[in-house]
Amino acid sequence: MSHVTGVIINGVGILLGSGLGMLWGHRLHSQFREQAMRLIGMVVILIGLKMAWPLTDPVNTLLSLIVGGWIGSLLGVNAALDRFGVWAESKAGRTGFSKGFIAATLIFNVGAMAILGALQEGLTGRYSILATKAVLDGTTSLLLTTVAGWGVIVAAIPTVVYEGVLSLLAGDVKDALQGALMQDVSVVGGLIIATIGFNFLLDRTVINIGDLLPALVVTLALGWVKMHGLSFL
């Protein structure tokens, strides 16, 4: 329990925020919802770009996104997420689940804050990063639920599982996620987050975000190679 307290707090923050969004969402005018979606998109773009700055190795970053996107496309990651969302939506008999679930899951989990927060708690027992993230995720989920549906609530499940696993396995992965490698992950994750923002801002899918998730693993591999004296420049 001592290594997942912050993880649970993060999950509760998402549940509270999205629950309030569900209660208040029906009172909001449709025009406001559309505007809120675009505003969320703008903020998410800024968050992503801030995470991605400074871009210290553009070649490795580009290779990570291209190769990772190719792997994700071959594996059908985005399609699998979509199928799960559609299946859950059909079981629930409500609309908007797929969009809300996928968007919220990625927003809450693709980024250095989730990784660093889980590692901090797993390695030190402190959870200040995850507590801060809980406030941010709770606020985001409140607004996101009003425009993307109740699937945002369910996104708390993969968030808790993802952060919990990282926290419990922190001792095994700590050497692979330090210094320059952490910066590489932050850059790639930030660009993926920014793309999510563009999808919301334009109200259409510009890039299949799910297919880019393997880029996070690819950037770790390229970073490891770079640390051992090789480069792709």
Image: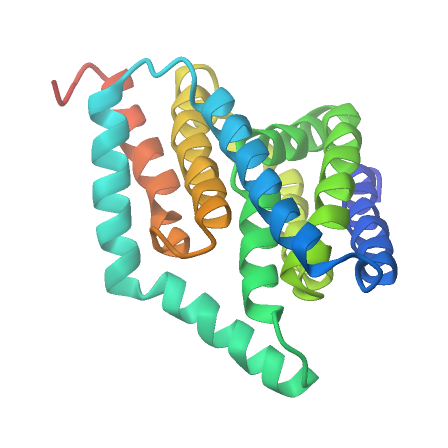
State the colouring used for the structure image.
rainbow
Residue 3 appears anywhere in the view? no
Q: Residue at x 28, y 17 (%)?
A: 227
Q: Residue at x 40, y 16 (%)?
A: 180
Q: Residue at x 34, y 51 (%)?
A: 206
Q: Quadrant of the N terminus?
A: top right
Q: Tell me where residue 229 appears, x and y as whole percent.
A: 19, 14
Q: Considering only vertical position in the picture, is 198 above or below 184?
A: below
**145 displayed left or right of 2:** left
Residue toward you, 174 or 10: 10
Q: Considering only vertical position in the picture, is 71 above or below 52?
A: below
Q: Tell me where residue 143 appears, x and y as whole percent.
A: 73, 47
Q: Residue at x 41, y 41 (%)?
A: 195
Q: Tell me where residue 192 appears, x and y as whole percent.
A: 42, 39
Residue 52 appears anywhere in the view? yes
Q: Considering only vertical position in the picture, is 100 above or below 209?
A: below
Q: Residue furthest left?
A: 233
Quadrant of the rendered structure where residue 26 is? Answer: bottom right
- How many circles with numbers are drawn on the protein? 0
Q: Quadrant of the C terminus?
A: top left
**80 displayed left or right of 58:** right
Residue toward you, 70 or 201: 201
Q: Tell me where residue 30 appears, x and y as whole percent.
A: 69, 60
Q: Considering only vertical position in the picture, is 179 above or below 163?
A: above
